[in-house]
Image: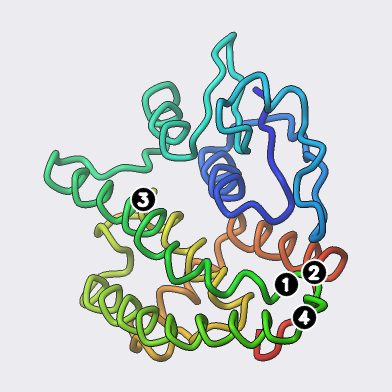
Amino acid sequence: MKLYSAPLSLFARKVEIALHEKALPFERVMVPFNQREGYAPKHPDVIAANPKAQVPVLVDQGLTLYDSTVILEYLEDAYPQPPLHPRTPQARARCRLLDVFADEVMLIPLKTLMHRTGPRPDDPARWVASEAAAALATPVIESQFRYLNQQLRGQTFLCGTFSIADISVFMAVLYVERLGGPGVETGGDSLVKWMETLKQRPAFATIAAEIAAADLELSEPVAKA
């Protein structure tokens, strides 16, 4: 099994956590990345495999897949133990909705913070405009955190048992943290406890540490991160 990943790719790192949680051995190919050119020039294998020319790309037993959600669905079907989805159809559907919430809903305000790890623009007005957009996104993120806090009331994990929803949402919350966004305490005690619990799991701790190390090498320092 081979995974094309990148040091600061939220979605590729999401797949890495799932592979570690399932104890699946894999070869990791880290594609080149820097804060000025991004992924240019893009890895030829990724271009050939993914019409969007993005990581993650997973190759397993002659099958090549892209898109983190599709990859995780495949891993659950091909390697069902330990499971990363709840047992009942209703719980699995809720789990998938939370995956979508993390990847598509939380990503929208999260994107407004991403300029902070890149080099400062030559035109100061561009930085001011980016920070203004981030300020507008702050209450949106805080509202999302409160929603997640409600989902966690009375349970350790988002879907009752540990699942892909926890991996996906963790990655979104972690990126809010590393980009200097609102703290999880703005959501509530349940969200704070959940984040602390996940950071103690070896797979999550390993990936979070690798991302932090990559930021030291590749990113500009972020205030309050």
> What's the amino acid at mark 4?
Asp
The Cα atoms of the two marked residues, 4 and 1, are separated by: 17 Å
Q: Residue at label 2?
A: 219
Q: Secondary structure at mark 3?
A: loop
> What's the amino acid at mark 1?
Thr
Q: Are marks 2 and 1 in contact (CB under 8 Å)?
A: yes
Q: Residue at label 1?
A: 117
Q: Nearer the viewer, mark 1 or mark 3?
A: 1
* Residue sticking out furthest to the right: 217
Identify the mark nearer the N-term, 2 or 1.
1
- Give the residue drawn at x 47%, y 64%: 170
Residue 111, position as x, y percentages in the image: 52, 66
Q: Secondary structure at mark 2?
A: loop
In the shown orientation, is residue 107 left or right of residue 85?
A: right
The Cα atoms of the two marked residues, 2 and 3, are separated by: 30 Å
Q: Secondary structure at mark 1?
A: helix
Identify the mark nearer the N-term, 2 or 3.
3
Q: Residue at label 4?
A: 123
In the shown orientation, is residue 162 left or right of residue 10?
A: left
Identify the mark nearer the N-term, 4 or 3.
4
Identify the mark nearer the N-term, 4 or 2.
4
